[in-house]
């Protein structure tokens, strides 16, 4: 299945993109499912509930450690083969958890899932970017990352409910089966791309220092830090505000993220920079409202809804900026760096929020989250030249129609590596 046939007539390759979105859904469901099953899993595995919580930690730690080295090691392999291998890794790890009665074996299975997840997240965005023309890249990435939102708002609650009805082992067997189905779907509907030959690979260090990469990674880190300070401890903050319905707040947030993804998908390819600035400014305003007027419950619920809208679209906007800066050919490596930074932001936000909660109380959480949110906003505002330009350079029309047609012909014939060579040749003329 060739790229031209996928995008003929300007249509998005919906089946392939939805397969990638389901892969994202499966990864998030696999990562977070133990958090909703602490009491159910603890007794059969003979451990305390806190040690079941460590199964989530094990996944995150393995993802953090594996994303960059595994991605670099597998750059030469065909992309679809690596994608299918990652999905089979989820199938194996979830099957082991579903069958295991040993905590050490379960923990090892979660480490396998985390390493698999780090590999998958490093691939998904770059894969989506290579399946569509540059001017449709943002929307394609939004479709794929919508799987994250659906997993958070529907998948994890549904998995918890399934565990309550038929047992936690069935809850883990479900994503195992889904992963196997996805392997077949990917083989049929997702195009195959070659791995990078050794002579064509840009070293990791050169990708990392490319202009614009570091600001995008910085925004990722500081946004996740600020977000996680509040999200991890939303229950004590809600209780502090006199609002005891934490579940309702989380439902409002999850529903609003769906709206954020939809709005972002509509706007991202035409106005990526203003949309990201608006999302970050909205998150900053939400923190101010939570810090000043959370005791007014209508304002609390409304602020959480706007927080969901802002955060729902932010990952898509940031990852699209990263792919624009790195180029689709090097997107896997760049995204592996972002996966590591993303997990570091989650860990740092949870730790920072916990320290603030213990030392200053729940009322300090919005004020603790505000500085990193402002740093993220300022970084985007300052990154007009490379990281977050007003006009996406690879989407802007070429100055000469004949050169544009020639460049498009080369891209259709030879793929991402040819695009990179064509750009380099053009700069030298």
Image (cartoon, helix red, strand yellow):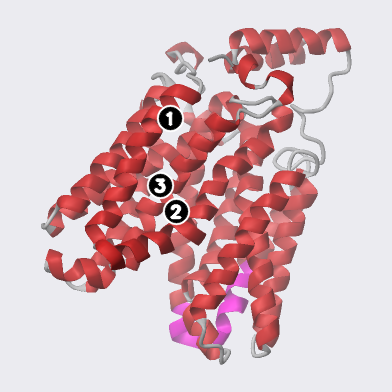
Q: Magenta stretch: residue 370 in it?
A: yes
Name the disc covering residue 343, or none: 2
> Up-down: is 164 above or below 90?
below
Q: CA distance from mark 2 to mark 1?
A: 29 Å
Residue at image position (57%, 14%) is 2
Q: Are marks 2 and 1 in contact (CB under 8 Å)?
A: no
Find residue 32 and report its image quarter: bottom left
Residue at image position (46%, 47%) is 25
Nearer the observer, 213 or 260: 260
Residue bearing the label numbered 1 = 185
Percent position (x, y) of residue 253?
59, 68
Name the disc covering residue 27, or none: 3
Query: In terms of sequence position, does the residue under pointer 3 or pointer 1 come before the other?
Result: 3
Q: Classify mark 2: helix, strand or loop.
A: helix
Question: How busy is the neighbourhood of tag 3: few (under 14 within 10 Å), some, or many (20 plus)?
Answer: many
Find residue 386 and report its image quarter: top right
| Residue most extreme to the front | 165
Q: Which residues are magenta?
A: 355-371
Give the number of callouts.
3
Query: In terms of sequence position, does the residue under pointer 3 or pointer 2 come before the other?
Result: 3
Q: Classify mark 3: helix, strand or loop.
A: helix
> Up-down: is 53 above or below 14?
below
Query: In terms of sequence position, does the residue under pointer 2 or pointer 1 come before the other?
Result: 1
Q: Are marks 3 and 1 in contact (CB under 8 Å)?
A: no
Residue at image position (61%, 39%) is 141
Evaluate whether residue 138 shows in this view. Answer: yes
Magenta part, dominant SS: helix
Nearer the observer, 254 or 413: 254
């Amino acid at each position: 299945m060739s790229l031209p046939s996928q995008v003929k007539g300007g249509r998005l390759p919906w089946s392939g993109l939805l397969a990638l979105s389901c892969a994202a859904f499966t990864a998030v469901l696999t990562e977070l499912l133990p958090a909703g099953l602490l009491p159910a899993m603890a007794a059969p595995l003979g451990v305390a509930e806190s040690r079941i919580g460590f199964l989530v930690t094990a996944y995150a730690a393995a993802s953090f450690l594996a994303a960059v080295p595994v991605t670099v090691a597998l750059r030469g392999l065909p992309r679809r083969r690596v994608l299918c291998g990652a999905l089979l890794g989820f199938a194996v790890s979830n099957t082991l958890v579903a069958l295991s009665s040993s905590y050490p074996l379960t923990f090892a299975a979660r480490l396998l899932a985390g390493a698999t997840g780090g590999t998958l997240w490093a691939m998904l965005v770059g894969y989506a970017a290579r399946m569509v023309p540059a001017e449709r890249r943002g929307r394609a990435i939004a479709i794929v990352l919508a799987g994250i939102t659906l997993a958070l708002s529907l998948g994890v609650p549904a998995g918890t409910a399934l565990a309550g009805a038929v047992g936690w082992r069935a809850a883990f067997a479900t994503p195992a089966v889904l992963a196997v189905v996805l392997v077949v779907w990917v083989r049929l509907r997702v195009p195959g791309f070659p791995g990078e030959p050794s002579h064509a690979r840009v070293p990791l260090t050169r990708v990392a220092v490319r202009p614009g990469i570091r600001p995008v990674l910085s925004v990722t880190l500081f946004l996740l830090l600020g977000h996680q300070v509040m999200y991890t401890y939303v229950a004590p903050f809600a209780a502090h505000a006199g609002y005891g319905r934490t579940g309702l707040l989380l439902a409002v947030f999850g529903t609003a993220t769906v709206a954020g993804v939809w709005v972002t998908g509509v706007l991202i390819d035409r106005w990526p920079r203003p949309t990201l600035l608006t999302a970050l400014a909205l998150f900053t305003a939400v923190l101010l409202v939570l810090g000043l007027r959370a005791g007014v419950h209508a304002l609390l619920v409304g602020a959480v809804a706007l927080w969901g809208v802002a955060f729902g679209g932010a990952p898509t906007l940031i990852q699209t900026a990263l792919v624009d800066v790195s180029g689709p050919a090097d997107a896997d490596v760049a995204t592996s760096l972002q996966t590591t930074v993303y997990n570091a932001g989650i860990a740092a936000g949870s730790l920072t929020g916990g320290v603030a909660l213990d030392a200053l109380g729940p009322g300090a959480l919005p004020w603790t989250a505000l500085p990193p949110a402002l740093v993220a906003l300022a970084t985007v505002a300052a990154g007009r030249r490379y990281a977050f330009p007003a006009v996406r350079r690879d989407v802007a029309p070429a100055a000469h129609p004949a050169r544009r047609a020639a460049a498009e012909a080369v891209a259709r014939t030879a793929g991402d590596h040819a695009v990179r060579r064509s750009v380099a040749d053009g700069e030298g003329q």
